[in-house]
């Protein structure tokens, strides 16, 4: 706790310094933003918190919107705190989308300090039934990984679509049609794997951090993880031993490894349990330039192949 507090203080100091240095460039950028807002053909400015929301927004808004992502590529979003420049980007946008269920610990503080009455704010988790945080309430009441469920991703995308329609009524038909097309892709993949997972006996898989709770809910599966829901914290020897036992008992052949969560621990675990390591995408950051649908297809295929 104290470590985290010190980290927050430190990062705030660094931020203040950074913002101070880049003052002149940011005001030039602001002028550009104001100019483009005045132009008739300007795209609707959308700011999203992190990667999957960018894809959902783009699937609906396509060339009518311009999306900026707060959490930079390759950065793990669980421990992120935003910069003053991010605050300005949000203030200057028409739409701000966040995932919800505690994923963005900074969101309440941000929304109270933003001065833009016209900003449409989208909590993309609205209407989704939350899962409790299996790690206990200390790190947040709910498991935030809703975008890894195809069904919940559809609700998130619908919330974004409704907000786009509200902010830009004249393109309503365009947004509705794009939403229908994207949600049909989500449904198709969901229906395919609903049948496939029903046919497998073993429902257990092992991954890096506990990001797949909602995916498991979709398909009646069970995840075991090296790290907790919010990432961070290498497993204790007891946890590791428990995982090795699960892997051996259920004859699990594959340990999934995430780029941003203890990949080496997954490797160690696989070695000690005689399993192989395979990559899985949490989509928390863009990986290997894959789209959301491509990443989910691979995830589901690889989980299915490891169970059947
Ligand atoms: Zn996560």
Image: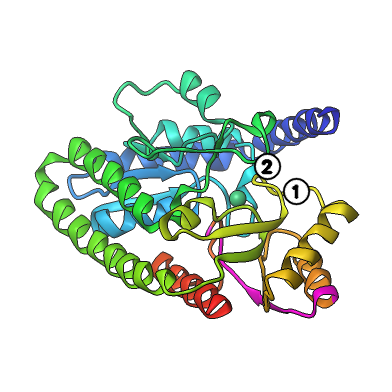
Q: Is residue 276 left or right of residue 189?
A: right
Q: Position of residue 207 (x, y in %)?
A: 66, 63
Q: Position of residue 48 (x, y in %)?
A: 43, 44
Disc 2 is placed on an element classified as helix
Q: Residues within 10 Å of mark 2 (few under 14, many from 20)?
A: some
Q: Magenta span has 78? A: no
| Camera-nearest residue between 112 and 83 | 112
Q: Are marks 1 and 2 in contact (CB under 8 Å)?
A: yes
Using the image, determine if residue 22 lies above or below residue 250.
above
Q: From the image, tell me which residue sits under label 2.
A: 79
Nearest-to-viewer mark from 1 and 2: 1
Q: Residue at x 27, y 69 (%)?
A: 188
Q: Position of residue 304 (x, y in %)?
A: 50, 75
Q: Is residue 166 left or right of residue 237?
A: left
| Camera-nearest residue between 267 and 241 | 241
| Coloration mode | rainbow
Q: Residue at x 56, y 48 (%)?
A: 71
Residue range in magenta is 272-283
Q: From the image, tell me which residue sits under label 1.
A: 232
Q: Quadrant location of residue 126? A: top left
Q: Residues within 10 Å of mark 1 (few under 14, many from 20)?
A: some
Q: Quadrant location of residue 261? A: bottom right
Using the image, determine if residue 100 lies above or below residue 307.
above
| Camera-nearest residue between 61 and 283 | 283
Q: Quadrant of the N terminus?
A: top right
């Amino acid at each position: 706790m104290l470590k985290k507090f010190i980290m927050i203080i430190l990062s705030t100091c660094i931020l203040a310094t950074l913002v101070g240095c880049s003052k002149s460039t940011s005001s030039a950028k602001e002028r550009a933003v104001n100019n483009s807002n005045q132009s008739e053909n300007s795209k609707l400015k959308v700011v999203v918190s992190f990667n999957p929301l960018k894809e959902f927004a783009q699937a609906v808004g396509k060339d009518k919107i311009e999306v900026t992502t707060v959490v930079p590529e390759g950065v793990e979003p669980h421990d992120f705190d935003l910069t003053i420049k991010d605050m300005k980007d949000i203030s200057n946008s028409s739409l701000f989308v966040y995932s919800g269920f505690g994923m963005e610990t900074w969101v309440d503080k941000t929304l109270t300090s933003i001065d833009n009455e016209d900003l449409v704010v989208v909590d993309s988790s609205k209407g989704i039934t939350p899962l409790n945080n299996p790690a206990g309430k200390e790190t947040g009441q709910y498991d935030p990984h809703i975008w890894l469920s195809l069904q919940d991703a559809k609700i998130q995308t619908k919330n974004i679509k409704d907000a786009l329609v509200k902010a830009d009524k004249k393109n309503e038909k365009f947004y509705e049609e794009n939403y229908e097309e994207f949600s049909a892709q989500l449904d198709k993949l969901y229906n395919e794997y609903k049948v496939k997972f029903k046919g497998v006996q073993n429902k257990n898989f092992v991954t890096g951090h506990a990001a797949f709770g909602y995916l498991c809910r979709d398909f009646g599966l069970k995840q075991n993880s090296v790290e907790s829901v919010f990432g961070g914290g290498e497993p204790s020897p007891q946890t590791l031993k428990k995982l090795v036992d699960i892997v051996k008992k259920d004859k699990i052949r594959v340990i999934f490894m995430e780029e941003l969560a203890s990949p080496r621990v997954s490797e160690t675990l696989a070695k000690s349990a005689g399993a192989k390591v395979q990559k899985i995408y949490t989509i928390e950051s863009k990986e290997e330039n894959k789209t959301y649908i491509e990443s989910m297809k691979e995830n589901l295929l690889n989980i299915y192949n490891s169970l059947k």
